[in-house]
């Protein structure tokens, strides 16, 4: 299992998404609602740019001293009675998780929303071994029933409306109630409660790990992560190696930014802090705690020109403002990491072979740059991907030929002059009154919807020479 979610060719995939009116309406409504709420919270907090500076500095400091913080974190977790696994690859991570589950003779695992567990394919590995995995996040639960991948890092079922959700619940679970969010949520809640009580293991992600104490922070709106860590006897937390904060003071800043940027709230519904397994006098909590720290390519990213992307706190703000995401949704990207952050990180973790198109699924409007709470220069990183692919010859052959022809003409003045003259005359014949009667390949639809400037049939160079001669003549 990789981060790839679709084998459909990129152009066909985005065509399918653009032609899905339900998805486009749902995503547009969510962007508008979350964007408006975010702006209210930003204005209320005040000094937002200073907060962004501080959050960015915290993340940069972590990345610059990551080895030291990872060592400190692992020492503290061990001192607290937990177990730590450093997994270089996704295979190492899933192998360890499976071994823990099998050592407990687990038949059922409850799981809270986690991007890194999606990334390494935990569900598939456990299910292949005969272990039932239940997603307990509301959106993820619905998607699991429908065998549909998530399309947003915070709101996984953003592409579905309530009528589609009711259909899924009816077909999979026999739900006959109304399509109101309240009724459907109550129905799902009752189902999941049964799983919480019978699961042997709870698996969660990790929003932030605190190096100074060995604590794990879980941020949810539904409280499902707290249930995953309270009722099962064994808790396994899985984190990307970069998701560390030095102290609680830094976590406070990052959570302040996360809640406002993700859903436009002062604080998420539940902020859970876990420091090892329960002690002897505790009545709830896991008897055993495991922390799986995943590399899976992050070390290479850390040492590359794309290092800044590791600042990401998975808030989804870039998706909530991106015009491309608005039209093609998360599934258009074909990765568990969609949107601008996905256009950067998917090729890094999954390779250019599968994700070479994503850096071009961007208009470079820089809207994502302006909302990122940790100041990741996403548009610049996307451009770097394009440059790297051009240097490595990954771009389409037709594009490479066109660039070579342009470079050759541009380095031969005579050829350039002839080409410009021919182009000017062709344009004057081709465009009339801002319109053209011809459809030109892939840009035909684009040209139909726009008025083009009339060409006067003369290049600037020849016009300039004429005016120079006229001025000399006039003295």
Image (tube, rainbow, N blue to C red):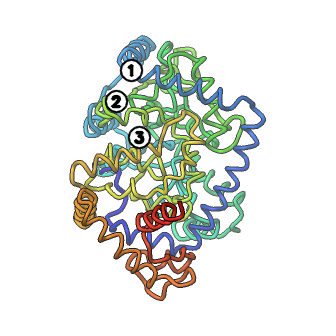
- In contact (CB < 8 Å): disc 2 and disc 3: no
Cα gap from disc 2 to disc 1, whole angstroms: 10 Å
Label 2 or label 1, whichever comes before in sequence order: 1
Left or right side of 289 for 395: left
Residue 116's disc number:
3
Residue shown at 31% from the left, 29% from the top: 303
User: x and y percent of residue 406 in the render?
Assistant: 28, 62
The residue beneath circle 2 is: 302
Mark whose residue sits in front, 3 or 1: 1
Q: CA distance from mark 3 to mark 1?
A: 18 Å
> Disc 1 marks which residue?
66
Residue contact between numbered discs 2 and 1, judged by CB atoms under 8 Å: yes
Q: Which dot, 2 or 1, sits closer to the camera?
A: 2
What crowding class fits label 2: few (fewer than 14 Cα within 10 Å), some (14-19), or many (20 or more)? some
User: Depth check: 206 or 384 in front?
Assistant: 384
Which secondary structure lies at badge 2? Answer: helix
Task: Name which of mark 3 and mark 1 comes first in the sequence.
Answer: 1
Residue 261: percent from left, percent from top: 63, 40
Q: Nearer the viewer, mark 2 or mark 3?
A: 2
Image: 208 above or below 315: above
| Count of numbered badges drawn on the protein | 3
Answer with the quarter of the image where residue 49 lies: top right
Q: As displayed, is residue 225 above or below residue 340?
A: above
């Amino acid at each position: 299992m990789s981060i790839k979610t679709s084998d459909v060719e990129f152009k066909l995939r985005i065509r399918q998404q653009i032609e899905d009116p339900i998805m486009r309406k749902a995503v547009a409504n969510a962007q508008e609602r979350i964007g408006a709420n975010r702006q209210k919270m930003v204005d209320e907090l005040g000094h937002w740019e200073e907060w962004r500076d501080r959050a960015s500095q915290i993340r940069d400091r972590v990345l610059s001293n990551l080895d030291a913080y990872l060592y400190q974190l692992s020492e503290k977790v061990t001192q607290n009675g937990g177990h730590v696994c450093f997994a270089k690859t996704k295979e190492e991570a899933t192998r360890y998780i499976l071994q823990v589950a099998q050592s407990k003779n687990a038949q059922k695992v409850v799981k809270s929303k986690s991007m890194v567990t999606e990334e390494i394919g935990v569900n598939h590995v456990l299910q292949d071994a005969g272990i039932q995995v239940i997603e307990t996040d509301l959106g993820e639960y619905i998607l699991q029933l429908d065998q549909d991948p998530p399309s947003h890092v915070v709101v996984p079922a953003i592409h579905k409306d309530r009528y589609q959700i009711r259909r899924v619940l009816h077909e999979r679970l026999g739900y006959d109630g109304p399509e109101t969010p309240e009724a459907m949520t109550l129905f799902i809640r009752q189902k999941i409660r049964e799983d919480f009580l019978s699961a042997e293991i709870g698996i969660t992600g990790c929003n932030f790990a605190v190096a100074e104490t060995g604590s794990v922070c879980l941020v949810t709106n539904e409280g499902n992560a707290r249930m995953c860590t309270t009722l099962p006897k064994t808790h396994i937390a899985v984190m990307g190696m970069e998701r560390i904060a030095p102290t609680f003071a830094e976590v406070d800043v990052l959570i302040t930014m996360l809640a406002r940027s993700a859903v436009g709230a002062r604080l998420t519904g539940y902020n859970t802090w876990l420091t090892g397994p329960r002690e002897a006098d505790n009545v709830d909590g896991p008897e055993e705690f495991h922390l799986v720290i995943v590399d899976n390519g992050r070390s290479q990213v850390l040492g590359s020109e794309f290092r800044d992307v590791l600042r990401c706190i998975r808030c989804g703000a870039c998706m909530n403002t991106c015009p491309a995401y608005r039209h093609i949704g998360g599934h258009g990207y074909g990765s568990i990491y969609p949107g601008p952050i996905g256009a950067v990180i998917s090729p890094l973790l999954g390779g250019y072979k599968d994700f070479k198109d994503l850096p071009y699924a961007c208009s470079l409007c820089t809207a994502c740059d302006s909302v990122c709470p940790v100041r990741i220069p996403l548009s610049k990183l996307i451009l770097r991907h394009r440059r790297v692919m051009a240097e490595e010859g990954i771009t389409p052959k037709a594009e490479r030929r066109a660039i070579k022809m342009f470079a050759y003409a541009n380095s031969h003045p005579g050829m350039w002059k002839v080409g410009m003259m021919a182009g000017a005359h062709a344009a004057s014949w081709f465009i009339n009154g801002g319109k053209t009667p011809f459809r030109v390949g892939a840009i035909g639809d684009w040209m139909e919807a726009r008025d083009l400037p009339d060409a006067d049939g003369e290049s600037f160079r020849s016009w300039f020479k004429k005016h120079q001669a006229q001025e000399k003549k006039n003295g």
